[in-house]
Amino acid sequence: MIVRIALIPVLSFLLLFGCSQKKDITLYEDTGTPSYGDTIVTASIGEPSNLIPLLSTDSPSHEVASFIYNGLVKYDKDLNVIGDLAESWKFSDDNLSITFFLRRNVKWHDGQPFTARDVMYTYKVTINPRTPTAYSGDFLLVKKAEVLNDYTFRVTYDKPFAPALISWSIAILPRHLLEGKDITTSPLTRSPIGTGPYKFHQWIPGDRIILVANENYFEGKPYIERYIMRIIPDSATMFLELKRYSIDMMGLTPLQAVKQTDYPKFAREYAKYRYLSFGYVYMGYNLRHTFFKDKRVRQALSYAINKREIIDGILLGQGVEATGPFKPDMWAYNKRVRKFEFSKEKALQLLEEAGFAKGSDGRLYKNGMPFEFTLLVNQGNDVRIRCAELIQKRLSDIGIKVNIRVIEWASFINEFIDKRNFEAVILGWSIPNDPDIFDIWHSSKQGVKELNFIGFENREVDELLVRARHTLKKEERQRYYFRIQEILAEEQPYTFLFIPYANIAIHKRFKGIEPAPAGIMHNFIKWYVPEGQRRYITHAPLSH
Amino acid sequence: MLRYLIKRLLFMVPMLLGITLISFVVIHLTPGEPGILDAEMNPKVTKEVRERIRSFYGLDKPLHMQYYLWLKRIIKLDFGISFAPDRRPVIDKITERLPITITINIFSMALIFIVGIPIGIYCARYKDTPLDKFLTAFVFAGYATPTFWLALLMMILFGVYLELLPISGIKSFHFHELSFVEKIIDMGKHLLLPVCISAFGGLAGISRYMKSSLLEVLRQEYITTAYAKGLSENIVLKKHALRNALLPVITILGLSVPGLIGGSVIFESIFSIPGMGQLFYMSVMARDYPTIMGILVIGAFLTLLGNLLADIFYAVADPRIRIG
């Protein structure tokens, strides 16, 4: 009896370890030569909603769609506009119209030829009032669109419009499959047909989406044979899958990037890439508030907040200080603007100038009113919540009381931002590739649901914004945006906090990855796995 | 009996109406609207675009009109089209996710009953022994442990360190290449952790129920009579006590029918199981009203049906109830 009982742990021990697979230790240092094959497995927290990108606003949908469709133009790795489906383009002398000369011999995934009529259809369906799309704004400015011949397409605007060219990076849709049908119920929303480097293969709802390389892609067939996006709704689970090597690519949080992946076994399997992400986090002031109306108060707060501490403490160093609405590797970025180094003395001095005085309780008062305000943060964003806590601490050091309120996103927007019912908020903006920031800073954009919710009004900025969007000369635009950044830095309508780094872990068998200002995905079709390092066999024909 | 049944069935109609009305109002009063929630604070989404999307979904109509239109459709069993950007029929979205949720729930419920009932019986028979105390502590630990925490620990142990079980999902990467038997094994491996962990949390309820109802029965006079007849403890327990003690437990089984289609969001998210919990959660987050209402109506219907069935069983078993 005793023997039998004693055997159980031994047996189960054997059972546990006997089955565990041995991993071949492959060295991934050899870069080998490009060859076709293998699969990349990525993961997404959310499931794509709709694979016609015109109809979706979520990022997983756009991520998948970016492999399937092309625009007329796109950004290269240094964020210059280059041709995609358009081989070249020409502005008219008055800068009012753009003529696109399209690539010939581009085929849709179903074999039909791509022509200018597809572009025309995409334009028409975008501006059709019955299409529920979020992207019609830029296209409603088009005065006239014409198909000159099968491979020439021309659009004309009322005024020269700087973001016009890049707005044509919108995914071009296949006219022959959609025209005359209701786009919202088209089967293409679930099994798209595009011109892009990958063809749609399968969508297992709630589980994964599988794409396969398009052998007829006009820039050459991608080396990686299959792309799989797994849907893993929990980020902790996703990270475990990464540690188990069952996903090949994943964006890491600062903690994961700095601490949790810092062990030899991980370093043997994964390479980490880092680039500045397209977004910044700021603390915005309601400029209608009695205290925040005064520029000196805002400047004082910017002095009192220690940005370095936020980056080092919360982002674990994975970010840079923001000085304005652009990131340092953009052409529009002006590095010579007023900076607010952390200084309590300067902060207090400015507040004194603004009429504040320390009361007997050590807090700041103006005309008997204590300096106290509520800082709103949206729920679910830990980085911002912790930022708010550091800001609260720093401001209480100089005698300002900050109350933090964390609110669920939808009510945050509807009840507080839209109703202008806030004193200060921590929020983030994504940084567009094109520097047009009219919608955020122009004084006319203060209506309900419009984005200048802090109520920023500056006549010079208004004028510069308008000029910058209606000229096509890059140098001229750059001059305007430089000046705008100077004014914003001086005015401090926001305290610009930081631009985080994007950290991405990619399995080491993938070669040819080039981090650039545009990120890493810009040359995805050139990524490859050398033959000896392949992991998944993909030569077997895929059944449809 | 028949009159009682008809009365109960008729009573279900206003109940169902009330449930839908309250749910409809509550979800429409939550801040945020479908379609544009992702696009909040997106510079490219202009005010005109918003208005257009609102009227596309019929959100510009007054609330009572929206409810009336919805009700008119639901009577014809038309659950409508989802407000999510995928614009799929709600019924498709639900039926595609039901099988996996039901499978997991049936397995875990079976496990709960298979393990929980013997534990309950043991604890009742050997009350206050060390093993009884240990088992009690064990089932309560299961009840008290946060599922997500336990799940993550198990995933780290079996997935990352031992590499025995897959971490998440329900099918392997190469599922379509497997033979039928391999497919079953593959699914089994994927479902092992989710089923065990969700069952662990449910053991406490059923085993405690079993224990107390068995103790109750054991105190009855006919058990004393049975002992007095000279029957062995085994026979007294199995033949006389257990049958009666099981009755309330079977009622619980009936009442858990509506629970079969419900899934836990946290649990399904952690294991990446595309089930009902996730669907419901995502619909709420996207303010996908037709899908939310669809799931709620089905849930409400099943709950009412479960209650009715339980009442009927009671009525069959106990004539006193039939009068009421």
Image (spheres, helix red, strand yellow):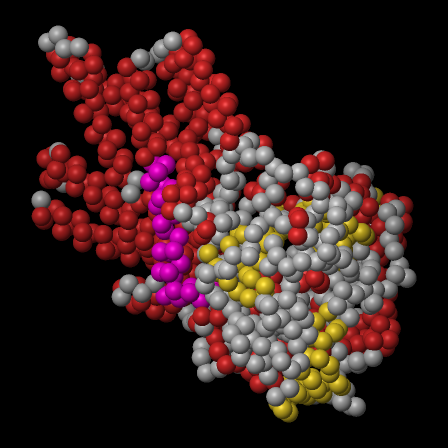
Q: Is residue A74 visible?
A: yes
From the top left corner, tell me how far across and down residue A100 is, in percent: 69, 84
Instruction: Give yes or no for residue B199 being in the magenta stretch.
Output: no
In the depicted structure, whether residue A81 falls above or below residue B121: below
A387 or B93: which is nearer to us? B93
In the depicted structure, whether residue A478 falls above or below residue A228: below
Instruction: Give yes or no for residue B85 being in the magenta stretch.
Output: yes
Q: Is residue A38 left or right of residue B184?
A: right
Q: Give the dominant element type of the magenta stretch: helix, strand or loop.
A: helix
Q: Is residue A459 visible?
A: no
The magenta-colored residue range is: B80-109
- The residue depicted at 23 percent of the width and 52 percent of the height is B12
Q: Is residue A195 left or right of residue A529?
A: left
Q: Quadrant of the N terminus of chain B?
A: top left
A465 or A335: which is nearer to us? A335
From the top left corner, tell me how far across and down residue B280 is, in percent: 43, 52
From the top left corner, tell me how far across and down residue B192 is, in percent: 43, 36
- The residue depicted at 51 percent of the width and 54 percent of the height is A208
- The residue depicted at 86 percent of the width and 47 percent of the height is A342
In the depicted structure, whether residue A72 falls above or below residue B101: below
